[in-house]
Amino acid sequence: MSSMTRSDVNHGKSVSMKDVARVAGVALGTVSNVLNNPELVSEATKARVQAAIDSLGWVRNESARQLRAGRSSAIGLVVLDVGNPFFADVARGAEDVVYERGMSMQIGNSDQRPDREARLIEDLEQQRVRGVLLAPVGDARRHVERLNQRGVAVVLVDRVGDDADCCSVAVDDAHGARVAINHLLDVGHRRIALVGGTTDLMQVRDRRAGAEAALTESGLPATLLVVSTPALDLANGIAAAAQLAVLPDGERPTAVFALNDLLAIGLLQGFMTAGLRVPKDIALIGYDDIAFAAAAAVPLSSVAQPRQALGGRAAELLLAEIDDQESGNPHTHVHERFAPELVVRKSSAARRPKD
Amino acid sequence: MSSMTRSDVNHGKSVSMKDVARVAGVALGTVSNVLNNPELVSEATKARVQAAIDSLGWVRNESARQLRAGRSSAIGLVVLDVGNPFFADVARGAEDVVYERGMSMQIGNSDQRPDREARLIEDLEQQRVRGVLLAPVGDARRHVERLNQRGVAVVLVDRVGDDADCCSVAVDDAHGARVAINHLLDVGHRRIALVGGTTDLMQVRDRRAGAEAALTESGLPATLLVVSTPALDLANGIAAAAQLAVLPDGERPTAVFALNDLLAIGLLQGFMTAGLRVPKDIALIGYDDIAFAAAAAVPLSSVAQPRQALGGRAAELLLAEIDDQESGNPHTHVHERFAPELVVRKSSAARRPKD
DNA sequence: ACGTATTACTGGAACGTTTCAACCACGACA
DNA sequence: TGTCGTGGTTGAAACGTTCCAGTAATACGT
C-alpha cells in the first residue's frame, strides 16, 4: 500500500498553482510567468515547474483566470433552432473564424421563444462574454441596447439591423421572396400559397412583404394565400400540407412558397401522403437551400443563402468591433447584406398553363 | 449636462456587489443574502437592495461565483458532428434534461478529430464542469480515466462503454447492422456494399462486424464490399456513389448499406446523377432514420435510433452520478442499451430475384 | 570601486463572489 | 435583573489566478 501511481495523485482537494509552486520550489508568480511569459524564466526553472505541473496534474482554473482578467475570451451565439441545418451551417462558419483567433464560442438556442432568448442572453452576460452573435426572435433593440451599455458587442445575424445600434449581416429576404414568387409566376402559377411562420420573426415579415410586392408588381391576376405556422420546422410543414390538401381542386393553390426548407420538405412529405403530386398537382419552392433540399423526394427548388459565409462574416464583424473597443478606435457599424440566389429544381418545374 | 438617465449609469468599470451594498447602505454580505438566502433578510432591506441592483444594472459575475464555489454548474457535451441531425437531436434530448435541473450545457464538436476532441475536453476541465457527455472518436478510456481522476463524471454517448469506468448509453449497433443486412438478403440481394467511415469510430466497427456476422450466419453465397470514407457526411456519400457507379453492371453491388443517413442521402444523390435508379438498379438502406430520410428523393429505408431518448437518458445518468458524488453515495455505473428498429421504405423495395 | 543595466525571481494585492463566525438589539423567560 | 434565544446584519476570510512593484545577483562601462 505504499506505492503511489500517477493515478492516486489527485484525490484530495483540487490542485492550484500554489501547490505547483511549492513542489517546484519557486514562487507563485514564477509559475504564472512560466505559463504566460515564458521568456522571462530561465530554462532550468521552466523545466522544474513543468515537471511539477505534470506530476500534480494541474489544470488551469478558468474562472479564476477570468475573474482576474475581468472578462472572458468567449463570445456567444444565440440561434433560433439548432436543429435547423441552416443554423448549424451558420454556427460552423462563425466557429471557424472565432477559433482561428483563439477565442471560444458558446452556442444557445432560443427555440424562437423570447423568454428563452432573454435567459440565454442573461447567462452570457453573467459569463462576461466579449460579444454576442444574435439571431433574434422579435425586436432585438432592447437586447442590443442593454448589451452595448455593458460594453458587450453585438452583431445581428440573419437580420437587417439598420434600426439597431450594432452591426448586422443578413441576406436580402424581401428580394429572395420576390425572386421565388416571380419564378412561380413565370412558370404559370396564379394561385399561390405562402406557408410559414408568424410575423414576430423579421425574416417572415420581410419574405411575406417581398412576396406580396412581387405579386402586385407583376400586374397579373394572381392570388396569394398566406398560411401561418407556429414554427418553421418539418412537423409544421406536414400539418400545413394536410390543411392545403383538403381544399377542393379548383380552389387549392397550384404552387406553394415555403418560408424555409424544413417546412418545404414537410409539405412535400405531407402532399405525398395526401396523394398530391409535386410538381404536377402542386409546385413547391423552399428557402435556405439546405443540403437536404437537393436530395428531397422531389428535388426542391429553393432560395439559396450563403450560410457559412453569413456566420463567418458575422464573427469577423464582431471580432473587429471588439478590437476597436480594445484599442479605443472609433467604431462604425456596418450592415452587410448578401444576395440570395434562386436554385430551380424539379419541384417547381414548368407547368402547362391550364387554368 | 447634469441630467443622468438610466443609460449612462454603467460607463465606468463594471459594477460589483460592493457597489450595490454601498448604494443600498448595507454590508456586502447582506446583498449576498438577498440573492442566495432571501429568507434571512427583512422585507425592507430586501427592497432597498433590489432597488440598488436595478438602478446600477448589476449583473452577477459568474466567474467569481464559480471560483468561490470551486466548481461550475455546467456540463459539457462533446459530439462528433453538430451538423448531423442525429447529434442535434441527441443534444436536444440532453439539454432538456439538464435545463430542467437548472444546470447548463456547453456543446462542442470534435469533427471526428482526436486532437479537437482532446482540446475540447481540456477546455471543459479548465471550466471545471461537473460532468461530460462524450461521444468519443476512438478510444475513450484515456479521457474517462483522466476526467474521473479529477472528479468529473463522464457518460459515454452512442457507445457501449462496458470496457471503460463510466456509465454509457448506446444503441446496439451490431444488431442494427444485422437487421439491415438481413433485410437486404431477404429481398434478394447477394452483392452488397457497406459504405462508411473508418474503423477508428467504434460505431463503424460494430456496424461492420454486425453486417459481416449477418452475412456468414445466413449461410447464403453473398458478398460484402466495404467502402471506407474519411467522414460520414453528404459529400462523402456522393463521392462513394461515383466510385460505385463506374463498376460494370454485373460487378456492382445491387444494394448498399450506408452507415448513416447523411451518407445514404449523399449516395442517393450520387446514384441519381450517375443515372442509376434506386431501388431498381441499386437498393439503399441508411442508419439513424433522421427526419430527412423519409422525405428523401426515394424514401429511405433506415435503422432508427431513439435519438432524443439517448441524449436524455445520458444526461439523466450523468446527473445521477453527480448526485451520488455529492452525497457520498456509492455509485455503480450502468450501461444502458437501446434497441434500434428497422424502418423499411421504398429505397430497399423487394427486388425480383434475377441474379 | 562605483553606479547602472539586465536578468531571474519574489511577494503581495486585486478581481467579485460566498460563507461563516461574530455581533447587536430586543423581547421572553425565569 | 440577568440570561437566553432569535431575527437581522456585519466584517473578513477564502477561492486561484494575473500583474506589478520590488529585490538580489550578475555583468558592463567608466
Image: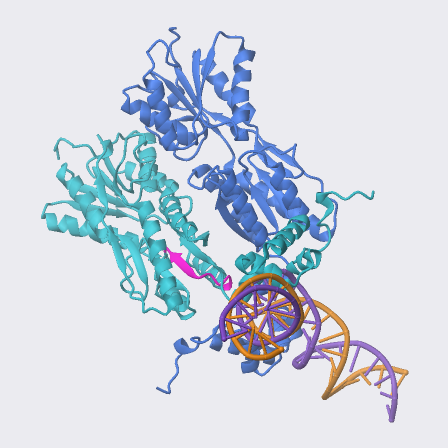
Chain colours: A cyan, B blue, C orange, D purple
A20 or B46: which is nearer to us?
A20
B281 or D7: which is nearer to us?
B281
User: Residue at point 52% right, 43% down?
Assistant: B78
Q: Is residue A318 magenta?
A: no
Question: In this rendering, is residue D23 above or below A295?
Answer: below
User: Residue at point 37% right, 40% down?
Assistant: A234
The picture places residue B222, in percent across and down from the top left corner, at: 47, 10
Q: Quadrant of residue A235?
A: top left
Question: In this rendering, is residue A229 above or below A163?
Answer: above
Q: Is residue A1 left or right of residue A134?
A: right
Q: Which residues are magenta?
A: A126-135
The picture places residue C20, in percent across and down from the top left corner, at: 73, 70
Q: Quadrant of residue A199?
A: bottom left
Q: Quadrant of the C terminus of chain B?
A: top left
The picture places residue B305, in percent across and down from the top left corner, at: 51, 32
The picture places residue A224, in percent across and down from the top left corner, at: 20, 46
B245 or A340: which is nearer to us?
B245
Asked whether the viewer can see residue B245, the reply is yes
Q: Is residue A321 left or right of residue B35?
A: left
A178 or B144: which is nearer to us?
B144
Asked whether the viewer can see residue A246, the reply is no
Q: Quadrant of the N terminus of chain B?
A: bottom left
Number of marks drawn? 0
- Residue extending farthest left: A219
User: Residue at point 29% right, 36% down?
Assistant: A245
Question: In this rendering, is residue A271 above or below B69?
Answer: above
User: Residue at point 38% right, 22% down?
Assistant: B347
